[in-house]
Amino acid sequence: MPAKDDDDRFTFGLVVDVADVLARHRYPELTSGDDFVALQQALFRFLYTTSTEPYRLDPTTEES
């Protein structure tokens, strides 16, 4: 996998496409910029985190 800084596939369009797929599967549609940022961050962690340790981030505060 390319280094995260060099991967031109990770775009806002990718996040929109994933959001559309989720909505087609009857998950709630993203309604705000914050929703898109949260999905983008989740995708980034999923795609580029190599640690096998669970990521401990409090979703309400975005802090470890």
Image (tube, grey):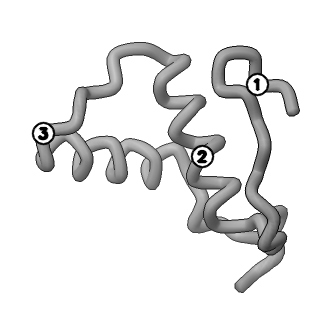
Amino acid marked by disc 2: Ala
Where does label 3 land, which residue? 26
Alpha carbon separation for disc pair 1 and 2: 11 Å
Instruction: Compute the Cα span from label 2 to label 3.
Output: 19 Å
Q: What kind of residue is marked 1?
A: Glu
* Count of residue discs: 3
Give the crowd class for mark 2: few <14, some 14-19, many >=20 residues within 10 Å.
few
Please tell me which residue lies in front, 58 or 35: 58
Which quadrant would the C terminus be assigned to in this image?
A: top right
Picture layout, residue 53 above or below residue 18: below
| Helix, strand or loop for disc 2 | helix
- Could you say whether the residue bearing mark 3 is in a helix, strand or loop? loop
User: Who's the residue at 65% across and 26% down the image?
Assistant: 59
Amino acid identity at mark 3: Arg
Q: Quadrant of residue 60?
A: top right
Residue at mark 2: 42
Q: Residues within 10 Å of mark 3 (few under 14, many from 20)?
A: few
The numbered mark, 1 or 2, whose residue comes first in the sequence reads: 2
Identity of the residue drawn at 83% across and 63% down: 5
Q: Position of residue 42 (x, y in %)?
A: 60, 46
Query: Residue 49, relative to residue 16: is it above or below?
Result: below
Q: Residue at x 73, y 27 (%)?
A: 58
Say which quadrant the N terminus sits in. bottom right
Q: Earlier in the sequence, mark 3 or mark 1?
A: 3
Q: Position of residue 62 (x, y in %)?
A: 76, 24
Q: Which residue is mark 1?
A: 62
